[in-house]
Amino acid sequence: QVQLVESGGGLVQPGGSLTLSCEAFRMLFTNYRMGWYRQAPEKQRELVATIAVSGSTNYIDSVKGRFTISRDNTKNTVYLQMNSLKPEDTAVYYCRAESLVISGQEYWGQGTQVAVSS
């Protein structure tokens, strides 16, 4: 059974940094576009960033220049480096795998909490 396991969340002060990791198990990692999403309290889940197998990336405007998504295909892992964190970045962050081979197939991690507060 495919599993995505996130780690790296926590409490950080405004202006601080965190790196999230998402390791994939029992899947052919290079068959998937990977993404990070987040959901703040009482808000809809939103896309934060995606990365293709080739390494091309996309970001929402609010994190451009502050967040960096990357992947290591040899470790089946996708990362989200978050710098200059703001209180509005507080959310549960989820990892998503979108199949490039089977239309509509996707997997989600369980989420990791990021809290930005002084």
Image (tube, helix red, strand yellow):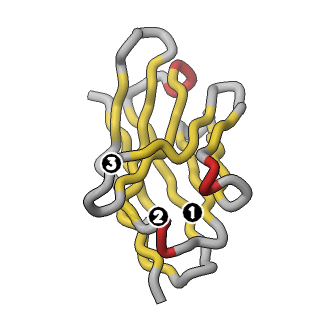
Mark 3 in CB contact with mark 1 (< 8 angstroms): no
Dot 1 or dot 2, earlier in sequence: 2
On the rendered image, what quadrant is the N terminus found in? top left
Q: Nearer the viewer, residue 15 or 110?
A: 15
Q: Indicate the position of residue 14 as horizontal and vertical percent values.
A: 56, 81
Relative to 4, say whether 10 is above or below: below
To which quarter of the image does residue 98 belong? top left
Contact, CB < 8 Å: mark 1 with mark 2? Answer: yes
The numbered mark at residue 44 is 3
> What residue did someone put label 1 on?
19
Location of residue 42 in the rendering, given as x and y in whole percent from the top left corner: 26, 59
Q: Is 51 situated left or right of 88 in this image?
A: right
**Residue positioned 36% across, 46% down in the render:** 45
User: Which amino acid does the dot numbered 1 rest on?
Assistant: Thr
Q: Secondary structure at mark 3?
A: loop
Task: Please give the residue where the numbered disc 2 appears in the rendered image.
Answer: 8
Instruction: Report how far apart the C-alphas of labels 3 and 1 lie in the structure.
Output: 23 Å
Tell which of 95 and 41 is nearer to you: 41
- Residue at image coords 54%, 42%: 77
- Give above or below for 19 relative to 47: below
- Residue 57 in percent (x, y) is at 68, 36
Judge from the rendering whether residue 12 lies leftward or rightward of residue 5; answer left or right: right
The residue carrying pointer 2 sits among few (fewer than 14), some (14 to 19) or many (20 or more) residues within 10 Å by Cα, namely some
Label 1 CA crowd tier, 10 Å (few <14, some 14–19, many 20+)? some
Residue displayed at 58% across by 53% down: 80
Dot 3 amino acid type: Gln
52 vs 22: above or below: above
The answer for how far apart the CA atoms under marks 1 and 2 are is 6 Å
